[in-house]
Image (cartoon, grey):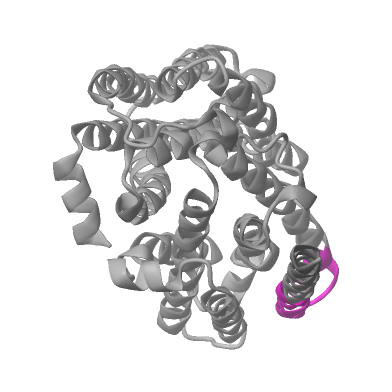
């Protein structure tokens, strides 16, 4: 995968510019996250406020993705990306204002603006990559999306955490704004260099992507991203609660476990070769096996008292889920026509987001009452069972559709 991405970066100047722009804005989003939550903690915000900040860091992506879908029918994808980045840049005025007023509403609003702009990126990025790359280069597009996500966690939040407390918050905010400005400049350069290789045809549009009108393969592709959240979201929410199993400060241990999670998310896609991606694309065996191994790794984390072993298991667990993530984005780009790829990605992402917003909250409240380890087993294991049932239902529906089509053709 790594060499495929390098080759694609060399062959397509716009792809390299786009990657650099998204890397910068992703780092900026990570810095914003650190500033907002650092300020909230300094103000000794109530747990309810921190929970609201978590929700506002995700939920506004819904209207953002819908707006981007509408704009894609009237504008080219990269100008919509530029608009998204401009909204993100303007949103920095809210935390800047709150630095001098200690206003919680402004801090929470800044999270909402960042989430709204991030939601706009979901359909636009997939649409751009599908239109600008050859079918053989689409695995590189999936890898790029994964690296951008990792940059937000490892570079943005990591750098912000190191700088916070050593530099004034206003200086970190200035670096944040600079990253957005440079990203916008690079996106303008990307727009000038972009040359689509896949032009949508008029007959490609599939209405509103009605579930019944999709093929079995397309429905399966849309299930991959929600599958990750169904199995992984409760386990990841309960990860800090497992830190009490180990000796030492629970805060330091929790941060080390989160670092292990981010490391697995970064290196997971690198372990798949281009040939393996093409071979496993559209198949269920890798999805099911990877998610089952994810649950096994987290189950072992809950029973070990050795921190180094727990970190290794968490790295392995998130290698498996990010292999699924790369295959999920690749399947959507391969199984949908260019005219609706962005809308299909946004549809799957919104379902994933709903699950991510609901299940961790339920698991967190349950862990307050019951043993977090047992809550982990039941929530992630139950999600896996639900996933198997949904996939089996889709498979049976596909067989019935195939039989009906054969009968119609034979008649």
Q: How many marks?
A: 0
* Above or below, 262 relative to 393: above
| Dominant SS type (magenta) | helix
Which image quadrant: the C terminus?
A: bottom right
Which residue is nearer to you in this view: 111 or 385? 385
Quadrant location of residue 340?
Answer: top right
The answer to whether one can see residue 38 in this image is no
Q: Residue at x 17, y 51 (%)?
A: 7
In the rendered structure, the answer to whether residue 345 lies left or right of residue 209 reads left
Q: Residue at x 73, y 72 (%)?
A: 395
Quadrant location of residue 273?
Answer: bottom left
Q: Residue at x 64, y 39 (%)?
A: 58
Q: Position of residue 52 (x, y in %)?
A: 73, 37
Q: Is residue 384 magenta?
A: yes
In the rendered structure, the answer to whether residue 393 lies left or right of residue 246 reads right
Which image quadrant: the N terminus?
A: bottom left
In the rendered structure, the answer to whether residue 129 lies left or right of residue 254 reads left
* Above or below, 295 relative to 345: below
* Above or below, 147 relative to 111: below
Q: Position of residue 6 (x, y in %)?
A: 18, 51
Q: Residue at x 71, y 75 (%)?
A: 384
Which residue is nearer to you in this view: 110 or 346? 346
Q: Is residue 89 magenta?
A: no
Q: Position of residue 14 (x, y in %)?
A: 24, 31
The answer to whether one can see residue 254 in this image is yes
Q: Position of residue 177 (x, y in %)?
A: 36, 19
User: What residue range appears in magenta?
Assistant: 366-385
Residue that sits furthest to the left in the current view: 10
Which residue is nearer to you in this view: 14 or 212? 212
């Amino acid at each position: 995968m790594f060499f495929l991405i390098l080759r694609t970066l060399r062959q397509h100047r716009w792809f390299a510019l786009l990657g650099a722009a998204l890397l910068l804005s992703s780092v900026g989003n990570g810095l914003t996250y650190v500033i907002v939550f650092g300020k909230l903690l300094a103000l000794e915000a109530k747990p309810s406020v921190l929970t609201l900040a978590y929700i506002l860091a995700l939920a506004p992506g819904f209207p953002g993705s819908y707006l981007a879908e509408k704009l894609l029918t009237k504008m080219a994808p990269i100008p919509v990306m530029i608009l998204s980045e401009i909204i993100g840049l303007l949103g920095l005025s809210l935390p800047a204002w709150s630095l001098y007023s200690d206003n919680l509403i402004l801090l929470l609003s800044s999270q909402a603006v960042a989430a709204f702009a991030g939601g706009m990126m979901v359909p636009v990025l997939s649409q751009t990559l599908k239109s600008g790359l050859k079918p053989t280069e689409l695995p590189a597009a999936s890898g790029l999306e994964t690296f951008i996500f990792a940059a937000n966690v490892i570079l943005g939040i990591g750098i912000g955490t190191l700088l916070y407390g050593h530099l004034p918050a206003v200086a970190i905010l200035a670096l944040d704004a600079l990253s957005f400005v440079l990203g916008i400049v690079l996106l303008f350069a990307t727009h000038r260099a972009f040359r689509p290789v896949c032009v949508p045809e008029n007959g490609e549009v599939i209405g509103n992507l009605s579930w019944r009108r999709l093929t079995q393969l397309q429905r399966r592709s849309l299930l991959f991203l929600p599958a990750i959240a169904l199995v992984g979201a409760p386990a990841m929410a309960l990860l800090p609660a497992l830190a009490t199993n180990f000796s030492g400060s629970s805060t330091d241990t929790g941060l080390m476990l989160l670092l292990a999670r981010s490391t697995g998310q970064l290196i997971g896609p690198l372990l798949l070769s281009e040939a393996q991606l093409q071979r496993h694309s559209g198949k269920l065996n890798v999805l099911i096996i990877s998610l089952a191994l994810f649950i096994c790794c987290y189950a072992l984390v809950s029973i070990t008292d050795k921190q180094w072993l727990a970190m290794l298991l968490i790295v392995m667990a998130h290698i498996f889920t990010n292999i699924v993530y790369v295959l999920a984005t690749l399947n959507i780009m391969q199984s949908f026509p260019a005219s609706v790829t962005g809308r299909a990605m946004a549809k799957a992402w919104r379902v994933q987001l709903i699950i991510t917003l609901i299940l961790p909250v339920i698991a967190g409240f349950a862990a307050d009452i019951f043993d977090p380890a047992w809550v982990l087993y039941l929530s992630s294991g139950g999600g896996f069972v639900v996933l198997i049932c949904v996939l089996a239902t889709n498979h049976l529906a596909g067989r019935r559709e195939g039989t009906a089509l054969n009968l119609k053709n034979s008649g």
